[in-house]
Image (cartoon, coloured by chain):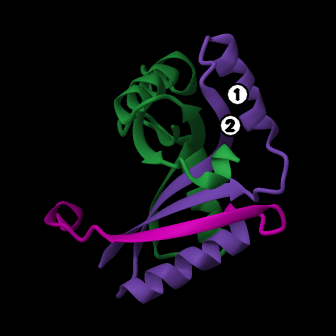
Chain colours: A purple, B green
Amino acid sequence: MTWLARVHVMLKPIVNDPQGEAILGALRSLQFGEVNQVRAGKYFEIQLDVPNRAAAERHADDMCRKLLANPVIEDYRIQIEDVSTPRDTV
Amino acid sequence: MTWLARVHVMLKPIVNDPQGEAILGALRSLQFGEVNQVRAGKYFEIQLDVPNRAAAERHADDMCRKLLANPVIEDYRIQIEDVSTPRDTV
């Protein structure tokens, strides 16, 4: 079966986010004065072939810890979706 | 009212994604052979003070077109959430 793992990686709330602050400054200079905070993060869509949802979750969590996120300063969250449609098997 | 706009920016499907391919290669070299595709994108959480949801959507869409996304090669999607909790008004 084919699964899609949607992975969000964000700096922990206590960690300063210079990219988000730069975007906030740029938005304000573009007259978006109503914006009061911006946090910038990374987003990955990962397709994987494993037999079940639990395995997909476990593998995606492994990938985050080993490569995609820096657990010292970043949090991540994973959503798993079944994408085993005929499209993928043709 | 305070709204949270969750913005995802991804390269259009027809556009080559070298960052995603590099991550795919790295995952395979870490023995994640079950992975068959990775797409890398950006994710922003933007807090804004506007009177209603429609205004929040319109402003977030403006921000994407003017700053956050390159509409020639990127798609974006916006989700709006009400975060007007007492925490924000204290």
Residue B64, position as x, y percentages in the image: 49, 25
What is the secondary structure assignment of the residue under circle 2?
strand
What chain letter is assigned to the residue under label 2? A
Comparing B58 with A78, the one in front is B58
Q: Which residues are magenta?
A: A68-90
Q: Give the labeled residue for mark 2.
A: A37
Of the residues shown, which amino acid type is indicated by label 1?
A: Leu
In the image, is residue B61 above or below residue A51?
Answer: above
Give the answer, above or below, for where B70 lies relative to A52: above
Q: Let me know if residue B72 is in the magenta part.
A: no
Residue B7 bears which disc, if any? none
Q: Position of residue B12 (x, y in %)?
A: 39, 35
Image point (54%, 80%), residue name: A59
Numbered tag placed on residue A24 in the rendering: 1
Placement of A49 over or under A6, stated as above or below = below
Position of the C terminus of chain A by quadrant: bottom left
Q: Residue B80 in the image: x percent, y percent?
A: 42, 43
Image position of B62 (left or right of A40): left
SS at circle 1: helix
Name which quarter of the figure residue A88 lies in: bottom left
Residue placed at 66% from the left, 37% from the top? A38
Q: Chain of mark 1?
A: A
**Residue appearing at x 39%, y 24% in the figure:** B58
- The answer to whether residue B80 shows anywhere in this view is yes
Q: Amino acid at mark 2?
A: Gln
Residue B31 in sight here: no
